[in-house]
Image (cartoon, rainbow, N blue to C red):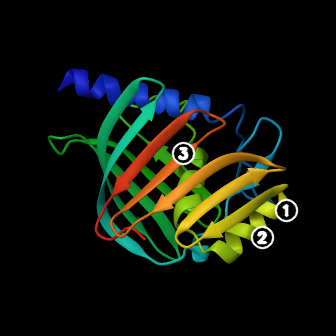
């Protein structure tokens, strides 16, 4: 149990640490943002821009370099909010994330406070938000979104930054720039 807690903590520290150079919470008109690349910000979309609501358990496998990690998350997302509860194999809560209009919060008894919830929300939005709204937000930040069926590719100029592959019950996100991959399996996730 303690080894699992340590590895989940390590995973979140590594994933968020490598996927961000800096992150700030801003209030008001601009909202929250993350750096998808070292110099380009992506402003988070409001909850109402989700492609379709979901309420499900997702099994998540992630890799960074040669390290692999596995955990579960209960995801409830609709037009008003994103809520995630991360838990271990024994069902103990490892962390809780909430994102609503003008508010974002992440609490965890084991995951360090240095984890920026904006990056978790950003990856979620890249996978599950309406492609019309997502394309518009990405273009404002200098990115291009290409859609091929259920798959998405995000470019900065001609450089492929992120790829997302969606199937009936799984979504795989590959961040080529930051060097991490994760797959979410649920029923159904797209």
Whether residue 145 sits left or right of residue 65 in the image: it is right
The foreground one among 24 and 179 is 179
Disc 3: CA contacts within 10 A as few (<14), some (14-19) or many (>=20): some
In contact (CB < 8 Å): disc 3 and disc 1: no
Where is mark 2, residue-wise?
136
The residue sitting at 52% across, 36% down in the picture is 180
Is label 3 in a helix, a strand or a loop?
strand
Where is mark 3, residue-wise?
174
Of the numbered discs 3 and 1, the one sitting upstream in the chain is 1
The foreground one among 145 and 44 is 145
Front disc: 3 or 1: 3
Quadrant position of the C terminus in the picture: bottom left
Disc 1: CA contacts within 10 A as few (<14), some (14-19) or many (>=20): few
Whole-angstrom CA distance, mark 2 to mark 1, is: 6 Å
Whether residue 20 sits left or right of residue 38 in the image: it is left
The residue sitting at 72% across, 33% down in the picture is 22
The foreground one among 91 and 134 is 134
Where is mark 1, residue-wise?
140
Q: Position of residue 54 (x, y in %)?
A: 39, 72
Q: In terms of image quadrants, where is residue 139?
A: bottom right
Of the numbered discs 3 and 2, the one sitting upstream in the chain is 2
The residue sitting at 56% across, 52% down in the picture is 123
Quadrant position of the N terminus in the picture: top left
């Amino acid at each position: 149990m303690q080894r699992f807690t340590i590895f989940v903590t390590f995973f979140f520290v590594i994933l968020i640490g490598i996927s961000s150079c800096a992150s700030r919470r801003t209030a008001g008109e601009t909202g929250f943002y993350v750096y998808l690349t070292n110099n380009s910000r992506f402003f988070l979309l409001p909850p109402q821009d989700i492609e379709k609501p979901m309420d499900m358990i997702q099994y998540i496998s992630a890799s960074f370099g040669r390290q692999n990690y596995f955990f579960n998350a209960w995801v409830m997302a609709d037009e008003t909010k994103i809520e995630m509860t991360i838990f271990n194999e024994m069902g103990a809560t490892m962390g809780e994330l909430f994102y609503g209009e003008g508010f974002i919060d992440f609490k965890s008894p084991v995951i360090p406070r240095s984890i920026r919830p904006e990056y978790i929300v950003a990856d979620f939005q890249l996978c599950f938000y309406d492609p019309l709204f997502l394309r518009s937000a990405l273009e404002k930040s200098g990115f291009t979104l290409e859609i091929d069926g259920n798959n998405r590719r995000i470019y900065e100029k001609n450089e492929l930054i992120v790829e997302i592959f969606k199937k009936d019950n799984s979504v795989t996100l590959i961040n080529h720039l930051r060097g991490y991959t994760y797959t979410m399996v649920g029923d159904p996730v797209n």
